[in-house]
Amino acid sequence: MRPIATLLALASLAPGSLTAQRPDSLAEEVREFVSVDTAVVALTGVVLLDGTGGAPRSGQTILIRDGRIAEVGAAGAVRVPTGTRTMDLHGHTVIPGLVGMHDHMFYTAAGGRAVQMSYTGPRLYLGSGVTTIRTTGGRAPYAEINTKDRIDRGLAPGPRIHLTAPYLTGGQGGGSMAVVNSPEEARRFVAYWGSEGATWLKAYTDIRRAELGAAIQEAHKRGMKVTGHLCSVSFREAVELGIDNLEHGMLTASDFDSTKQPDVCPIAGVGEMGQADPGGETAKEVIATLVKRRVPMTSTLAVYEPFVANRPTKDARMLQAMAPELRRSYLQLRHEIDSAGTGPVPEQALLNAMAFEKAFVEAGGVLASGVDPTGIGGALAGYGDQRNYELFIEAGFTPAQAIKIMTANGARILGVDRRLGTVERGKLADLVVLKGDLTAAAAVIRQPVVVFKDGVGYDSAKLIASVQGRVGID
Ligand SMILES: [Zn+2]
């Protein structure tokens, strides 16, 4: 038995674990959720959205062998060896495992509730079809390091995890975040968390250009990447500094505030930012800058929607998963927002954010997505990732485009696209089997039956059942 420290060091060299996880290496606590554990399995008769953005194909067969996709193609074109376990999945859709690019391991909700979700988070993510996450800002970093380690060692069910260091901000008073007010402090912070296994950094609203630039330089020196939920630094300034990714899109782009002073976060809130024209000059310039410098953007529409009045924000599955006291306070707040007729985020701001993301993709930008399980608490781990799909369809993306955003694009940003993110021969068998035809109804995204990670099939319903009434507690 190696000491934990060695295992953690190894884990840090291999983000997301490089070797496929086999059923016989899983602890009983994980095996109880496994519904498909044969080394070779054929999924037949499915509608396939393979993550490449190509047109959906029906009547497809996918052959999984030893944790990888061995063959994909039309029935008849794929030879299924005799004796292979075959699952007849007519009436089902298969997509790649979702790659959640803003999928925190903590949860916050109205009234100041903030909890680490080491128990509910991994189960909700995996059960909802999310097989890879980037934590995109840690609140209890050692809880997150240890959760990743337990999942990688087969001791707990959950997605593969790309660790992000604690949030890095500037100014005064950072709550649970690190505050840096000199480039030297920023570099020291990055060096430390890099050595602890973080592969990403998340810069937050009050960080200034000098500290962000120093953090980016230090991160790149160590092979780490930096994303940001920014404000004091605009999107265009961050691109100049070499940032690798930008979170949330239009509603956090202070480029849209014409009164903005350098290194100062304007008072204007999300609502005001969202009043800008998503097709206007500033939008065009921001998009052109990101596209030219190949900086991807992460969409988190699902966390904004619960701030908007009279939107579908009371998913029965979500309410059942919530702890009773949380459910009461959430419904009370939602009632107040709906009866006021307008919430902290005007509906037009949400629609503008959607239009901005559509324009970004049309201009050649790489868009990914994640849930961001924060805000007023209406975007739960996994469920909010699914909701993003429905919002992408509302924004005008095709099902194939939306699935690519939620899978292959995330894998590309994480640098793991050669191993996962699409349903293609040789890739790790991370697949979601959905009940129904996703191309006919967006809500089919809410119907995972089996979620394959490394070719091991997990029973979605069992994972979800194990967290009922616990969201908001642990
Ligand atoms: Zn976040």
Image (tube, rainbow, N blue to C red):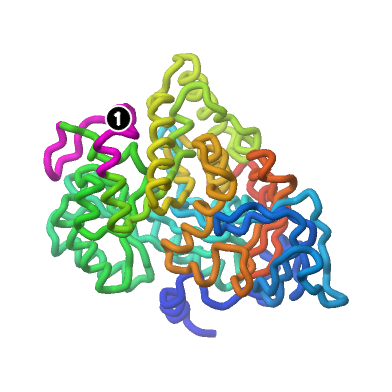
Residue 292 on image: x %, y %? 29, 55
Residue 223 located left or right of residue 415 = left
In-front residue for pair 235/205: 235
Task: Identify the residue at horizontal 69%, vertical 67% (top origin).
Answer: 72
**Extreme residue toward the right, this view:** 83
Q: Secondary structure at mark 1?
A: loop
- At 43% from the left and 36% from the top, the residue drawn is 354
Camera sees residue 424: yes
Q: Position of residue 391 (x, y in %)?
A: 52, 37
Q: Report which quarter residue 212 is drawn in.
A: bottom left
Determine whether, in the image, residue 84 is placed left or right of residue 464.
right
Q: Which residue is mark 1?
A: 276
Nearer to me, 222 or 276: 276
**284 drawn magenta:** yes
Quarter occupied by the N terminus = bottom right
In the rendered structure, does residue 185 fall within the stretch colored magenta?
A: no
| Residue 318 lies in quadrant | top right
Type of the residue with mark 1:
Ala
* Within-10-Å neighbours for mark 1: few <14, some 14–19, many 20+: some
**Left or right of residue 108: residue 450:** right
**Res 281 quadrant in image:** top left
Give the answer, above or below, for where 306 lies relative to 2.
above
- Of residue 64 and residue 279, the one placed in the foreground of this image is 279
Q: Main secondary structure of the magenta part?
A: loop
Q: Magenta span covers which residues?
A: 259-285
Q: Residue at x 33, y 34 (%)?
A: 279
Q: Residue 447 in the image: state x and y as whole percent.
A: 69, 45
Res. 120 in view: no
